Every structure is written in C-alpha cells, then in structure tokens.
Amino acid sequence: MYYSDELVEEVRQRNDIVDIISGYVNLKKKGGNYFGLCPFHNEKSASFSVSPGKQMYYCFGCGAGGNVFTFIMNYENYTFAEAIKLLADRAGIALPEIEDSKEAREKENRRKTLLQINKEAATYFYYQLRAPQGRVGLDYLKGRQLSDETMNRFGLGYSNKTSSDLCQYLRHKGYPDELIRESGVAVFNEKYGMSDKFWNRVMFPIQDVNHRVIGFGGRVMGEGEPKYLNSPETPVFDKSRNLYGLNFARTARQDNIILCEGYMDVIAMHQAGFTQAVASLGTAFTSGQANLLRRYTENVILSYDSDGAGVKAALRAIGILKEAGLTGKVLNLEPYKDPDEFMKNLGREEFAKRLSQAENTFFFELRMMQKQYDLSDPEAKTKFYNEIAKKLCGFSEEVERENYTEAVAEKYNISMESLKKLVTGYAAKMGMAAEVIRPKQPVQQKNTPKEQQENVQKLLLTWLVEEPHLYKKIKKYITPLSFTNELYRQVAQELFPKLEEGKPNPAAIISRFSQEEEQREAASLFNTKLPYMQQDMESQSQVQEREKAFHDIVVKVKRNAYEQDLKASGSDMEALSRVISGRQELDELEKTHISFD
Ligand SMILES: [Zn+2]
C-alpha cells in the first residue's frame, strides 16, 4: 500500500459508492439496494447490485464485486494509485507525497513498465507488418483471407528477420535490458547477449480482458520450428488465467462462448461474426481458464480440430469444463479440419447451423469411444456396451442417468432393459451400487472436498458479516488460523478485530488486497447469499433451524482446521500444540448449543 490505511479509509468513506457508480451505470433503487446493468459483462436484465449499507457492489451474473476503489480500477482500467488519486481529488482530500512501502511501489512500477514494453512491442510489430519488410507476413494473412479491419482489430503484426531490431528499438525508447528480458520479448545468451525472441513471425498480441497487451503468440513464416511460439509467463502474463479473444468475446452478447484451439481460429470466427470465440494460449485448456469462462457464460462450445490430436484435446477439455460446472458441447466440423477451413468451404450460415447442432459432450465421448471397436464383431460390441454402461454409471443423479440410458439405448439400438441391467450390474461389480442408487445430494456435488471445505469457510465469514453479534459465540473456537484458504485467512485477520469491536467493515477490507482476483474473491465473501437468511419475524423453529445450520458450519470449519493441524503436526511444533487444544475445543464445540439470542 502507498498510503496509510487511515487515509485509504478516509478517501473511501468520503466517496459514496452509489454516487460514484451512478456516474457510470444507470441505477434503480429496489428495496435497500440499487440495481443496474453490469458494466463488466453482457446482460439484458439487471443483476449488478450496489449496496449503500455495505458500500459495495456485486454482480450476481459475473461475480464482479468490490468497493469504490475496485470499481474505478476495473472500470477505468486504473491502478490502485490512480484510483485513489481520482477519488481523493473528487472528495477534496490532499494526498501526501508517496512515502512508504518501497517494495510494493517497485513491484507496481515494474508491472506497469512490463505492460508498456509489451505495448511498444505490439506497436512495433504492427508497423513492421505494414512496411516493405513485412510483406511476407501480410501476404500470409491476406492469403488466410483476413480483412484489414480484422487485422487492425486484433493488432496483428510481424517480427522481422533481423535478430535484435526490437531490442534496439526498446533500448532506444529507454527501457533497461533487464526489463526487456523480463517482458519475454527478448532472450539472453551468454555468447551473443540479448536478442529478439520472435523473428520472421506473424505476431498475435495477447490481450487481457481490459485490452492490455500481456504477451504474444507468433507464427513462423515458411518452414521454421516451432510453428507457433509464445511469450513465456511473466509477472503480467499468466497463461492459465487468460484466454485469447476474451477481451472481445466477453461483450459478444451471446449465450455461449466458443472455445477454439488457436489464434487463427478465433480471428477467422470473429471476422465471420462469431465474436464469442476464444482460445487457450498455446497451452492445453486449464481449470483456471474454465473458471474464468464461468464468469461470462455457462455454455461452452468446443471447436477443436477434427483430427486425432484435436479430439484428444477436446476430450480433455470436456473433463475440465465438467469440473468447473460448465455445460459443454462439441462442434462437428467434419469433413473439414478446422473452423477456418469449414467456413471457407461451407460459409458462415452453415457454420451457424453446426453451432446450433453442437453435440452433447456425453454423446461425443461415446462416438469417439465407438471408433475403437469393430461393432460387427459380437465380442467387441459387448465390450463397447460395457464401456457405455460404465460411463452411464458416472451420472450420480438418477433422473439424469435414466434419461441418458434411454437416449443411449435408442441411439445405439440396444434394448432399454438390457442396458439398464448392464448399468446396474456394472455398478455392483465396481462396488458403486450405493453410489449409483443414492439420490441426488442437495449440496453442489461437483465440488472437490477442498472446494467444499473452502465453501464452508466462506459461508462462515459471510454469516459473521451479516450477523456480527454471532462472533462472540464462536471466537473461543475459531481464529483466523482456522481458515485453511489463504485469502479467507487474511480476510479473517482483518475482520475479526473489527468484529471484536462490533464494527465489521467489509468495504475497507477489500482495499487491503492489491490483486483484482483477490478483491473479487473477497468481495464475493460479503455478498454470498446465505442458505438460511434471517427473517423479519422468525418463528421458533426457523431460529432453531438457523442455529443448527450455523453450528454445523462452525463445527466443519473447526474440524477441518484440526485435521489440517494434525497432518502438519509431524513437522510443525505450533501445529502440534494447536492439535492438543484443538481436539478438546472440537469435542466441546460439538456438544455446545450455539444460541442466537
Ligand atoms: Zn456482471
């Protein structure tokens, strides 16, 4: 932080959040809160809420949330220092000369410079493409039938055949070698010193959702290896948390996002009007990217190459989407290899039709599996059916499993009766009978145990903010160390002393985090809906029900912390001492009735 917590807090308090956001978003009052169309994602109905009481905003659609600082930072694409400057000016507060935390300031300056270098490099590449020496690149892109407008939109460029002209250009602009190297546009070699990382390549600047260039992908001209080369990860480029094209796709106003394999697929699709296309960044699709997508859509359509490698990648991506709770569908591009080729041959209308016919991932998986079996051979056929049954066991929800069993039976012309038998038989054989027959669990069952534990921790924090008086009932058992999630622990460290004073201050806590991801996550803590909301007039049984739910949550958090300590106690003396007292506290807590009075 640049400024003292008190000053940051003063600036925040003197800028009412409803006032500030009204300047950007049309807000309507509804009950105690204000609602409007979210400026951070596309929507037709207002799910963006602003709470004057909490002095926070939260979008129930995309999860964007925070206080006045985060709003200005995200909306204006400002750093924290810029946001506080704007808000301090607005409130007539004079900011002192920046005095403290040299380290934080240096880190921020470094990030800023790296972004500048990326931007300079993108500009440089851009002009090279349009200069005589960029001819080879331009011819290539024109050959791919990209229009000038498309090339400009994506800021496409070209890196020359000379080995260090970009480095020279950046040096000339005054950037130090160390940062040029760190930005990833240059490589270093003991013998030759610093040289350009990219040469003789068509350049694809990679932008984050705020349109800042954070890295590059480059496609070699002619027969070089590798065909595609990407920037390394840097302090501003985290491949697993960005997607190519998302800066445009997030405002595409479509109910789906198309996930493709490469830069060219994305660009070709955008040019054809499918502006909801994105691609992972020269690496396989990751769960971080799936979580990022989940902010903008629930439906992801996979558009991977129809060759062996593409199918393999698609199957992998399907698993990741499922884990993230997203619905996936797979686009069938046959007989063509990729979307670009498909559209060139059959046109955009036909592509749109294929999009609407995209195949359910389950059937896609079956269809791919089927290719390994010769169905004219009875033995192979039996094996295939058994594999189907095994896959059907994967649906733990009975209705869903029944529906799929029925659909599969029809599609593959198997009698429903025998397929059902196979499924049950398979389940029993695998000792999964209980699993399969078990009715649907009310809790989200897609979560891993770790996620479930974190959800409970989150719920407890939310509950304490909503009903601060409950803090004194649990403080004997729960400390910030009880939170195994690092971010939640930090929030608890900030929140608990305030609860002790009876003055929780969520909006102030948000300012403690400097990364957008953390601010968002912290903001969501204070805006999650509790499963048991406090009613105006509660009946005795309602109160009891809430007391029980609260008690369950506290016990779970405590038990989880205890188990964590137990695991660590072999090597960690502090954990060992916590284990001893923790066991007693846990026993006591389990027997204790927490009353809401
Ligand atoms: Zn939103």
Image (cartoon, rainbow, N blue to C red):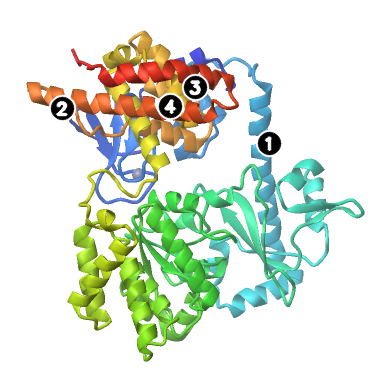
Does any portion of residue 478 appear in the rendered image? no
Whether pointer 4 and pointer 3 mark residues with C-beta atoms closer than 8 Å, the reply is no
Q: Residue at x 30, y 50 (%)?
A: 43
The amino acid marked with disc number 1 is Arg
Q: Earlier in the sequence, mark 4 or mark 3?
A: 3
For the residues labelled 4 and 3, the Cα–Cα distance comes to 45 Å
Does any portion of residue 357 appear in the rendered image? yes
The amino acid marked with disc number 3 is Asp
For the residues labelled 1 and 3, the Cα–Cα distance comes to 26 Å
Mark 1 — residue?
Answer: 110
Q: Is mark 4 within 8 Å of ligand 1?
A: no
Nearest to the eye among marks 1 and 2: give it. Answer: 2
Q: Earlier in the sequence, mark 2 or mark 4?
A: 2
In this view, the residue farthest toward the top is 501
Mark 3 — residue?
Answer: 89
Q: Residue at x 31, y 57 (%)?
A: 432
Nearest to the eye among marks 4 and 3: give it. Answer: 4
Mark 2 — residue?
Answer: 545
For the residues labelled 1 and 4, the Cα–Cα distance comes to 37 Å
* Ligand 1 placement by image quarter: top left
Give x and y (percent) for residue 37: 30, 44
Give x and y (percent) for residue 3: 57, 18
Mark 4 — residue?
Answer: 561
> Left of 288 or right of it: where is 22?
left
